[in-house]
């Protein structure tokens, strides 16, 4: 297994463990919306969005490098 994959899996496991230990219900306010939601969902959702953005930027960079060559 590649080093990056191992580090990524370890980081994801740490995020999941941290999330499960913070399972209280919290109020999330965003502009005029107010939601009562589990903190686990907020943490995992933020992690998922960050992961998705990172993957999309990585793909964009690879595509830009291929078009320049």
Image (tube, helix red, strand yellow):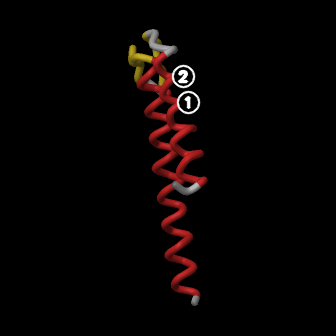
Q: Residue 20: image x %, image y %?
A: 46, 18
Q: Secondary structure at mark 2?
A: helix
Given residues 9 and 50, the one toward you in this image is 9
Q: Residue 6: image x %, image y %?
A: 55, 47
User: How packed is label 1: few (under 14 Cα within 10 Å), some, or many (20 or more)?
Assistant: few
Residue visible at 47% across and 43% down?
A: 49
The reply, left or right, for residue 35 in relation to residue 56 is left
Query: Pointer 1: what residue?
Result: 14
Q: Farthest residue in the bottom direction?
A: 69
Q: Residue 27: image x %, image y %?
A: 46, 14
Residue visible at 49% across and 66% down?
A: 59
Q: Farthest residue in the top direction?
A: 24
Q: Residue 13: image x %, image y %?
A: 51, 33
Quarter of the image for residue 40 reads: top left
The C terminus appears in which quarter of the rendering? bottom right
Q: Is residue 33 above or below residue 64?
A: above
Q: Is residue 59 above or below residue 31?
A: below
Q: CA distance from mark 1 to mark 2?
A: 6 Å
Given residues 58 and 17, the one toward you in this image is 17
Given residues 1 and 58, the one toward you in this image is 1
Q: Is residue 9 above or below residue 58?
A: above
Residue visible at 51% across and 23% down?
A: 17
- Name the mark on residue 38: none
Q: Are marks 1 and 2 in contact (CB under 8 Å)?
A: yes
User: How packed is label 2: few (under 14 Cα within 10 Å), some, or many (20 or more)?
Assistant: some
Query: Pointer 2: what residue?
Result: 18
Q: Secondary structure at mark 1?
A: helix
Q: Farthest residue in the front direction?
A: 1
Q: How many badges with numbers are in the image?
A: 2
Residue visible at 56% across and 38% down?
A: 10
């Amino acid at each position: 297994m590649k080093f990056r994959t191992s580090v990524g899996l370890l980081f994801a496991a740490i995020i999941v463990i941290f999330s499960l230990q913070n399972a209280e219900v919290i109020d999330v306010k965003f502009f005029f919306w107010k939601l009562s939601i589990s903190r686990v969902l907020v943490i995992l959702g933020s992690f998922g969005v960050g992961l998705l953005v990172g993957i999309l930027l990585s793909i964009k960079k690879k595509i830009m490098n291929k078009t320049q060559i």
